[in-house]
Image: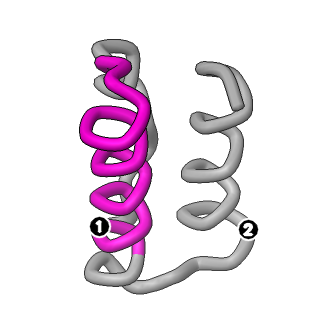
Amino acid sequence: MGAAEVEALLNMLANEHRVSTSTHNQALCVILFLYREALGIDLPWLDGVIRPA
C-alpha cells in the first residue's frame, strides 16, 4: 500500500467506522511497525491522517 491507501484506511476507520481512539492508535502502530521494522520504509506523510476525537 502506498501513502494514499494507508491514509484512506486510517481515515475510513476514524470517519466511517468510528472506531475508538485506542483502536485507531493500535492500527496506526501496526502500520508503522510493518513499514519501519519489517519493510524498512519511513512514513513521514502520516502527519495528515485524521485521528478520532
Give the residue type at disc 1: Asn
Q: Which residue is mark 1?
A: 25
Residue ID at (28%, 33%): 36
- Give 37 or 12, whichever is nearer the viewer: 37
**Residue 22: % across, % down:** 27, 82
**Residue 12: % across, % down:** 69, 57
Q: Which residues are magenta?
A: 24-43
Q: Which of the two labelled residues, at mark 1 and mark 2, occupies the earlier sequence position?
A: 2
Seen in the picture, residue 25 relative to 48 is either above or below; the reply is below
Q: Quadrant of the C terminus?
A: bottom left
Task: State the mark number for residue 16.
Answer: 2
Residue ID at (58%, 78%): 18
Q: Is residue 38 magenta?
A: yes
Residue ID at (61%, 37%): 6
Residue ID at (44%, 43%): 50
Give the residue type at disc 2: Glu
Seen in the picture, residue 44 relative to 9 is either above or below; the reply is above
